[in-house]
Image: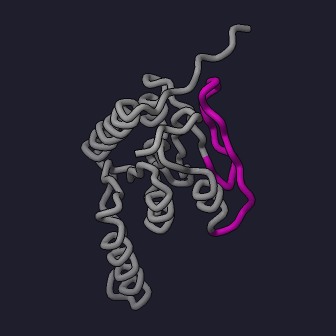
Amino acid sequence: MSAPREEPIALYIDADACPVKEEAYKVAFRHHIRVLVVANAPLMVPRHPLVERVIVPAGPDAADDFIAARVSRGDVVVTNDVPLASRCVAAGAAVIAPDGRPFTANSIGMQLATRNLMEDLRSAGAITGGPKPFSPRSRSEFLSALDLAIVRLKRAGFRPAPPPEAG
């Protein structure tokens, strides 16, 4: 296995409609992980040296393209977008849905196929309901999954961000 890269662990949040941004910040701050909040509109983010707000141009895949172009092994991505998850898994990143469900090399093919089937059924009018409501249990499972992903990266030799410079 190759040596871990020089860059510290980064957490990318596909922020448009992400219900767990606050939870992600909490875990990232505890582990001293850099957070990139990527969206195509300005969002409120904490004023913190570890948080960077990235505003991409409007467009259907602009945030996805930004994340997929930069993510690599040793990073974590939070997204509910299955095609983006597939691109990030292919790049070697740990990818977690907001409900804590991991996207892995072993599961992403089936998740893409299910997503495409559901999209076809919705467009045909066979399914009219949306996803189930986001629950406190989903939030808790996300917190556990994100913490576990970061701990695994640290154990594999990836490092957190350096402490901020004293001013």
Residue 128 appears left or right of 160:
left
* Above or below, 36 relative to 85: above
* Above or below, 67 relative to 118: above
Q: Characterize the magenta stretch by its predominant secondary structure.
A: loop
View extreme (top): residue = 167
Residue at (25%, 43%) from the top-left corner?
Answer: 137
View extreme (bottom): residue = 124
Q: Quadrant of the C terminus?
A: top right
User: Horizontal and vertical percent for residue 25?
Assistant: 49, 32
Residue 43 appears left or right of 95:
right
Q: Nearer the viewer, residue 151 or 27?
A: 151
Quadrant of residue 166 in the image? top right
Residue at (53%, 46%) from the top-left corner?
Answer: 13
Magenta segment range? 38-60
User: Horizontal and vertical percent for residue 106?
Assistant: 29, 63
Q: Nearer the viewer, residue 73 or 96?
A: 73
Q: Nearer the viewer, residue 27 or 122?
A: 27
Residue at (62%, 24%) from the top-left corner?
Answer: 48
Say whether residue 66 is magenta: no
